Image (cartoon, rainbow, N blue to C red):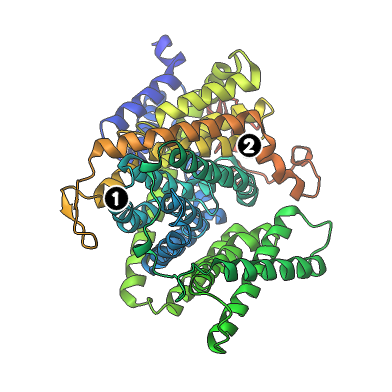
């Protein structure tokens, strides 16, 4: 009996993993484990029924947490945009822009994936949209099917690291840190990862040209009457808008302003100026812009406005992430309305799915806090802290072991499960070792991103499998027989991108400044020197869900308060 009591934390954790592997719902597995072992602890005399009095306060703290409002706002925004046809227009336009170069269609998929990530933040929407639209086109023109499927699946997962990402919201909440800081910390790794995908496509197209051929002449629909592509006018309007944006930015924004604020304002000004030029050219019939130039501006600038409405207002300090999410949801509805796509069915479907996803997140969070209460009651935080603190290598050894553990857990658990089960256990240990929790959160986010493309359980692979051709078919344009896409093709295609993401994990680990640049945005006050006494604790005031009556060090045994 004494052995069982002393080793209750690992027993609880292994029991939880067992329930999950058996297929029980995550939320109910967490809650059932917490209640079951709590009753067992009461039976063993470790604590009394008064121990459960902390539970209502924790659950009420979840309901009070304003930061979680960002989840339904960003989800609704993404679903409305996905159903408004924005992805189709982006893929067609950018595909025509990059298509004439080798690997251009694949590059277009990555660029669109990054733009969808910065607007929708929903992996399923990105993967399904790009799988339906771009996969048949790439197969039509002879792309290697492993490269084509890998690019689509990996590009869809950019929604997990490029803000506004749901996983970043959850990680910030679980780590007790600002969502805005988490967004700032993740933005550079997200763009580096996007660039790495594009670099891989370019290298693949050079080493094996047949794997990523250029778009044939007859497929280029935006050529000029004289046969030219019309890229000169696009370059000219880009340079004019850039010069004007740089001049206005120097007037409107202070020189001492943060870099991300200057970049956001410059991009907004560039989009406004380019859009005004394109509108004037169209309605005044000036004939100054080519077809491809007009198309690129009219298709790409509206999503950029939405990105500014969400991320820009957060970065320049005008809005909180919750307020930015609300503006983004309203902006997506207005954008869908301007495209003539808004109707009652679209809103009903989007709100129905948003309600389900939000309920899913909150139920898991409630289950997680029940599990964590009992786990902490048995001294689980102390056990986890001692386990990882004894690792050789200090901070680096801890980060390596955690990264390896999360990588292998991602084979079986999705990012929500990892965020709600693993992060509350590891966060206090990381903080006690002096690791910046924003850096730690972004490192986990990049690592958990691989869970979407892990064979055999990666959700992005399942989404792509659901829309990829399951049988041989005749292509409507070329009349050729296109072989089906096998599950093996999808799995093999994901391997190269898993390696790229693991390299990104190593980069974030070795080069913390990729994330830590967010610290340059604050007032210079060290948060660790601030003490706030709010009386009785709650989930909302304690980032790791450890009620303050149990002791404020985050590792003490809460059961002691009820002996």
Return the x and y of residue 524 as percentages of the image width and height.
81, 45
- Is 289 located above or below residue 149 in the figure? below
Return the x and y of residue 488 as percentages of the image width and height.
25, 35
Read off the residue under disc 1: 139
Return the x and y of residue 139 as percentages of the image width and height.
29, 50
Question: Mark 2 touching mark 1, by CB under 8 A?
Answer: no
For this view, does 437 lie left or right of residue 76?
right
Closer to viewer: mark 2 or mark 1: 1
Q: Is residue 44 visible?
A: no
Name the N-terminal-most of marks 2 and 1: 1
SS class of the residue under badge 2? helix
Q: Give the residue drawn at x 31%, y 35%.
A: 491
Foreground pick, 44 / 104: 104
Give the residue at the far bottom of this rendering: 284
Foreground pick, 517 / 250: 250
Q: CA distance from mark 2 to mark 1?
A: 40 Å
């Amino acid at each position: 009996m004494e052995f069982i009591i002393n080793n209750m934390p690992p027993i609880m954790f292994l029991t939880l993993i067992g329930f999950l592997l058996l297929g029980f719902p995550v939320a109910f597995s967490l809650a059932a484990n917490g209640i079951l072992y709590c009753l067992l602890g009461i039976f063993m005399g470790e604590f009394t029924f008064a121990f459960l009095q902390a539970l209502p306060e924790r659950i009420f703290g979840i309901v009070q947490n304003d930061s979680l409002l960002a989840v339904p706002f960003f989800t609704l925004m993404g679903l409305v945009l996905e159903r408004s046809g924005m992805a189709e227009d982006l893929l067609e336009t950018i595909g025509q822009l990059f298509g004439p170069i080798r690997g251009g269609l694949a590059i277009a998929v990555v660029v669109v994936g990054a733009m969808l990530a910065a607007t929708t933040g929903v992996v399923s929407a990105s993967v399904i949209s790009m799988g339906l639209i771009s996969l048949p086109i790439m197969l039509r023109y002879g792309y290697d099917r492993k490269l084509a499927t890998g690019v689509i699946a990996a590009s869809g997962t950019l929604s997990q690291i490029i803000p506004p990402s749901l996983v970043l919201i959850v990680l910030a909440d679980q780590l007790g840190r600002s969502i805005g800081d988490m967004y700032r910390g993740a933005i550079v790794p997200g763009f580096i990862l996007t660039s790495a995908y594009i670099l891989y496509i370019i290298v693949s197209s050079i080493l094996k040209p047949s794997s990523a051929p250029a778009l044939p002449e007859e497929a280029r629909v935006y050529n000029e009457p004289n046969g030219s592509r019309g890229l000169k006018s696009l370059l000219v309007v880009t340079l004019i808008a850039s010069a004007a944006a740089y001049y206005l930015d120097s007037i409107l924004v202070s020189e001492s302003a943060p870099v991300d604020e200057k970049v956001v304002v410059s991009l907004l000004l560039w989009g406004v100026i380019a859009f005004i030029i394109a509108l004037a050219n169209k309605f005044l019939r000036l004939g100054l812009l080519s077809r491809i130039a007009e198309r690129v501006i009219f298709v790409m600038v509206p999503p950029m406005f939405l990105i500014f409405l969400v991320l820009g207002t957060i970065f320049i300090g005008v809005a909180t992430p919750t307020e930015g999410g609300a503006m983004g949801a309203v902006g997506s509805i207005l954008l869908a309305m301007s495209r003539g796509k808004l109707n009652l069915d679209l809103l009903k479907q989007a709100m129905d799915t948003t309600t389900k996803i939000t309920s899913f997140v909150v139920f898991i969070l409630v289950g997680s806090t029940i599990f964590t209460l009992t786990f902490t009651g048995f001294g689980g935080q102390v056990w986890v802290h001692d386990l990882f603190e004894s690792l050789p290598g200090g901070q680096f050894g801890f980060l390596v072991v955690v990264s390896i553990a999360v990588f292998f857990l991602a084979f079986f658990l999705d990012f929500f499960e990892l965020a709600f089960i693993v992060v509350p256990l590891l966060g206090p240990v990381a903080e006690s070792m002096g690791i910046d929790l924003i850096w730690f959160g972004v490192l986990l986010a990049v690592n958990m991103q691989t869970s979407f493309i892990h064979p055999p359980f990666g959700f992005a692979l399942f989404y792509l499998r659901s829309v990829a051709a399951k049988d041989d078919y005749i292509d409507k344009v070329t009349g050729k027989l296109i072989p089906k896409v096998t599950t093996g093709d999808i799995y093999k295609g994901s391997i190269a991108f898993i390696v790229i993401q693991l390299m990104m994990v190593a980069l974030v680990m070795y080069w913390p400044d990729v994330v830590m640049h967010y610290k340059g945005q604050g007032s210079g006050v060290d948060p660790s020197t601030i003490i706030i006494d709010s009386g009785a604790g709650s989930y909302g005031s304690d980032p790791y869900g450890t009620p303050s009556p149990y002791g404020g060090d985050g590792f003490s045994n809460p059961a002691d308060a009820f002996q």
